[in-house]
Image (spheres, helix red, strand yellow):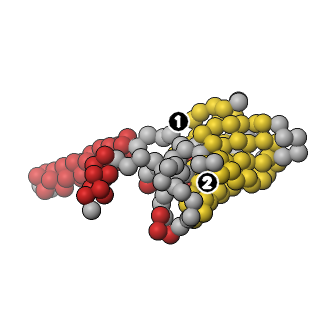
Amino acid sequence: MNLMRLRQPMAALVLGGTAAFFGAMTSAHAFSNPPIQMAQGVEYMCGGTNKAEAAFMQMVSPRWAATIEFGINDSAQRGSFPARAAVQVREKYTGRPVMEAQSQGPYMLARLDPGAYDVNVTLGGLTMTQTLTVIAGVPARAVFMWPSNFDMASVMPPMPQALAQTSAAR
């Protein structure tokens, strides 16, 4: 058996596998998970500002008790989301405050205890309220959509400097 004929395919396989491994490691490290934060003893995580982070938040959301999603009800602004909205969670029947935090992206995941809650989200002076019922082992979800005629310019994330200059030049 000719060892040279065996070495070339083996070397190609090893090099290709190594390149694939390092390529996977590089792309895995290009994105870091959003940090888990605490508010009044409740763990929460905000994110989804880019495609990879949004995919991550959607992937892990079933492991969290509650998912609160924010968006704009306008097809022209699809993919837009409020920069920072004030989120307040209260017990439904007692009104006791459970958690207050600022969202930092289109998704907020929270580890709420089982129970019924009123979730108030305030953005630009407009407060929306929804009831959220958390059942042990069953992820709950509330979606807050601001109307298309709402003045989003004052509450949108700032554009990167280069993009703002390009838009202004048009």
Q: Name the residue under label 2.
A: 69
Instruction: Give the image location of residue 32, x and y in percent.
Output: 44, 40
Q: In this view, does 72 lie above or below 136?
A: below
Instruction: Give the image location of residue 69, x and y in percent.
Output: 61, 54
For the N terminus, the image quarter is bottom left
**Circle 1 crowding by C-alpha within 10 Å: few under 14, some 14–19, many from 20:** few
Q: Is residue 86 left or right of residue 79?
A: right
Q: Is residue 104 above or below residue 71?
A: above
Q: Which residue corresponds to the image point at 24% horizontal and 52% vertical from the top-left? A: 16
Q: How many circles with numbers are drawn on the protein?
A: 2
Q: Which of 148 and 11 is in front in this view?
A: 148
Q: In this view, does 157 lie to the left or right of 37?
A: left
Q: Earlier in the sequence, mark 2 or mark 1?
A: 1
Q: Which residue corresponds to the image point at 27% horizontal and 51% vertical from the top-left? A: 165
Residue type at mark 2 is Glu
For the C terminus, the image quarter is bottom left
Instruction: Give the image location of residue 25, x and y in percent.
Output: 35, 43
Q: Give the CA distance from mark 2 to mark 1.
A: 17 Å
Q: Which residue corresponds to the image point at 16% horizontal and 50% vertical from the top-left? A: 7
Q: Nearer the viewer, residue 161 or 140?
A: 161
Instruction: Give the image location of residue 82, x and y in percent.
Output: 53, 51
Question: Residue 35, which numbered label?
Answer: 1
**Circle 2 crowding by C-alpha within 10 Å: few under 14, some 14–19, many from 20:** some
Furthest-bottom residue in this view: 75
Name which quarter of the figure residue 166 lies in.
Answer: bottom left
Q: Which residue corresponds to the image point at 34% horizontal and 47% vertical from the top-left? A: 160
- Work out whether residue 141 can be spotted: no
